[in-house]
Image (spheres, coloured by chain):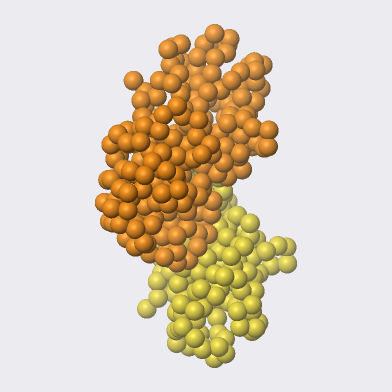
Chain colours: A yellow, B orange
Amino acid sequence: MTRYKLVLEYDGAPFVGWQRQDNGPSVQGEVEAAVAAFCGEQVNVYGAGRTDSGVHALGQVAHFDIGRETTGDTVRDALNHYLRKAPVTILDAAVVGDDFHARFTAERRHYLYRILNRRPPPALDRDKVWWVPKIVDVEAMHDAAQVLVGPHDFSSFRATSCQAKSPEKTLDRLDVMRDGAEIHVTATSQSFLHHQVRNMVGTLMLVGDGRWTAGDVQVALDARDRAAAGPTAPPEGLYLVGVDYP
Amino acid sequence: MTRYKLVLEYDGAPFVGWQRQDNGPSVQGEVEAAVAAFCGEQVNVYGAGRTDSGVHALGQVAHFDIGRETTGDTVRDALNHYLRKAPVTILDAAVVGDDFHARFTAERRHYLYRILNRRPPPALDRDKVWWVPKIVDVEAMHDAAQVLVGPHDFSSFRATSCQAKSPEKTLDRLDVMRDGAEIHVTATSQSFLHHQVRNMVGTLMLVGDGRWTAGDVQVALDARDRAAAGPTAPPEGLYLVGVDYP
């Protein structure tokens, strides 16, 4: 068997999420169908991050094993051929060793959250950004974000559906900056709890619109209680940008 | 009567173009319906550029006259309310004098053409870029583009459907540059012939992929014959970026 690593870009809007589910089309299901069309083998495709419905990827990573031994470029082009009707594209494919696992050997995951912060709604980026019409204080959001950087118990930012064994994670970086009419929140960690990025963004927005201070974010973090933090930001602003491996 | 100037952003994909037509929804028709819903008046909304089906706008300009006298902000918010189901948004609205005409007083129009130049197809930017899988020579395209800058008879780059009185236009600027996996072509002129930007981009692509030289572009220009130039680039890469007024 040969193991292939994939780097994928996708539009999350039409999918129930990365993971195969009974209630609609998934990115994983599309890629598995493309692999089957390519080589006739039914495989599991393992992703680094199980992105939710509506969440996008600029650089999701996945892997699978098949009997067919060929080049990464052949796999990339063949899968893109079979994926041509879906908003999913293979940016890169490569042969990797059996010690590579998209999920379990990932060292760092990078996310971007895009907020369109202007009074007129998005026309070209519908389903691609969170539209926040009231102008918010980005500097205050960035300062408050630093409260969350480092090793913490992130129970206050964890979805009730989260299956992680521990709520303790180390957040390497959480930056908030303005880029024209957009606000970009970038987050890096070895791994994230379910909804962690969206819950952090939703909480920082309370700071941005003046309802909360950085001190309130600290209180929410210390509470270790989901009810203590802010609302969950919508999925359409979130992008899995990339995943680092040793 | 009060004249209002609008600046609009829209996604051209679902429309037959800016202009009202019998064969489907137009941006002009959507805006006119929003004006009617706002004030009960049936008006003509005049646009600076009659973008084709699939062509987008980041800063189309339009104007209309109504009896209702109010602020630009009120008009902007009201029209955005009635446009909320369409991928059309009013970025700005302002009261202007009767001497303002979106089309006839425009001094310069700015267009952007986005090419995704990578082997994997677009997933997130479907219908937003022209996908060119073979890597092309951007520097050669930029150099050849300079042949077209200045006052010329652009008959070779003019659609047969073009209704302009004269094929003579002055192209102020035509730049081609790479931005990551994208190539951006920016074009500025007081006005353009029908399909002029797309015909110039399609012709420059012949240079980018090595089939033509800058000299061939010169020959094509001098021929004053549409058949002498390259193919028309697809509409989905084109954006009307902005329009300047005195």
- B177 sits to left or right of B160: left
User: Who's the residue at 62% across and 62% down the image?
Assistant: A85
Q: Nearer the viewer, residue A116 or A144?
A: A116
User: Who's the residue at 52% across and 65% down the image?
Assistant: A89
List x then y, in percent, for residue A92: 45, 72
User: Who's the residue at 40% across and 75% down the image?
Assistant: A245
Q: Residue furthest right?
A: A22
Task: Specify the quadrant of the image occupied by residue A105.
Answer: bottom left
- A30 sits to left or right of A58: right
List x then y, in percent, for residue A96: 44, 84
Q: Nearer the viewer, residue A66 or A209?
A: A66
Q: Is residue B134 among the parts visible in the rendering? A: yes
Query: With respect to residue B237, does A111 lie above or below?
Result: below
Task: Specify the quadrant of the image occupied by residue A186.
Answer: bottom left
List x then y, in percent, for residue B68: 58, 11
Q: Is residue B88 among the parts visible in the rendering? A: no
